[in-house]
Image (cartoon, grey):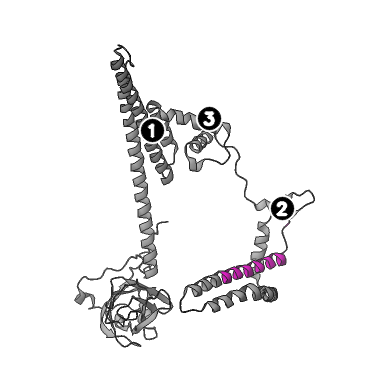
Amino acid sequence: HENTGSHVMQPQRPRNVCSARDMMVDSAFDRLERQADKILVKRVARMRTDPYESNLSALVLEKIWLHVWPEVREPLKAEYLEEMLSKKSDTGCEVAILRAEDTKPESWPPPPSGCASPMSWLRAKILYVMMPADRPVRRSKLDYLMYYGFMALELCPLTCQLVLVLQLALIDASDEFQLLHFICRAKVWWIAQRLLLLLIGMGQFHLAVYSVASGACGIGLPGSSDFELLLSLSLLPQYLLTVLAYVLYLHIRSVRQRTYTQRQASKTARQRGMLPHKFAVLPRRCCMRNAVPPDPKRSGRVEVHAIQAANLEAKDCKGDSSDPYAVLSLGKEKRKTIMRLNCLNPRWDEGFGFEGVLQDLAGNAAPPLHIQLYDYDMMSSDDKLGDMRVSLQPLLKQYEVVIPPTCLAHTSSGQLGLTLKWRPFAPDEATGNSKAAHVYEAAE
């Protein structure tokens, strides 16, 4: 947009391809600068908290970024723009043209409708009045009138039930905040009503004492005990409404907890490479299963189970224990186990998978499974506890291979054992080819 003489923002005409491309490259450079600044700030903060790092190094690095970088920023930016603009790309031109077309006012989305239905307006107005967190900053006289009117109605136990029923009918039953606010509001007014009943009872008591002391007859409130009983009975619907709101709140919490658990399970399975598939049915007995060798051209998943280490080297500062974790690498894919605190004989009962064709995973030209053990350190880099390379070629002959405890390399002590499994995918019924058939959908 550009400013006109009348100080009214007008939509600017779409720029040409070169100007749009200049703007794209400029934005890319600014994005790289922001990323570098974020990384540098984290590095400086870590250097200041690390007792093994010098504060002078952090100070020098910060001074260089604050004083030297602004001086060399513009020449580097000009060189970066010239280098990027010198690369002629049809795809980049098309993207620039599309972005230039998006600046046209005709491509803007239509504005939302300014008028709402009367029922929606009334519902929003009542909720804004009843709920302090949803109340607007600027309140009109109508808002104040409705607020004090609802407060007067809620103070009386006979009309409070109607206000609570109205609020429970208007709130969003899937919003935890609104349900909690309803429960707290009902409990607050329940306490206020109990105080009102207490004042009524105290008034009756003082009237009875006064009538006995003065010897007067007929001084009192006829039917006041019946009124108090009616007020006490009117609290029962309020209890039921509160219990209903609490049941709805527990249901929403259980649904959210289940959704969160499914999302975390999906994330963990994706990180470990153990997403559910349709697998081929194999015989249950190990002898019958290994009687027929696997098909090397079949696609499936290599699974690593029961990773167990023993007699690891103690790398903690006290020299009596370690916090080990393992990193599994197969080609370009990596998997990481959880950390075991203060343990020299850890066992990871987790499953890790690597998908692909068996010939590519366990063939002669395939890389071995590389397992590295580390000791986790909070204040410094993690110490190495040894590593081991495991060949997957035995999986070409049998579906399950048990690797006995073997001494780790590049360490003074430590053994590692594990179990390898080959699980072929079920053939696709439509094409007859082995294909990964995902049956898992992550809960979003």
**Extreme residue toward the front, this view:** 213
Please tell me which residue lies in front, 370 or 384.
Answer: 384
> Which image quadrant for residue 391?
bottom left
Element at badge 2?
loop
State the residue position of label 2.
11
State the residue position of label 1.
192
Asked if 83 appears above or below 116 in the picture, the reply is below
**Do we see residue 435 in this rendering?**
no
* Dot placed on the residue nearer the N-terminal end, 1 or 2: 2
Amino acid at the residue labelled 2: Pro
Circle 1 Cα neighbour tier, 10 Å, few/some/many (<14 / 14–19 / ≥20): some
Amino acid at the residue labelled 3: Leu
> Which image quadrant for residue 89?
bottom right
Of tags 1 and 3, the one toward the viewer is: 1
The x and y percentages for residue 377 are 39, 76
Q: Main secondary structure of the magenta part?
A: helix
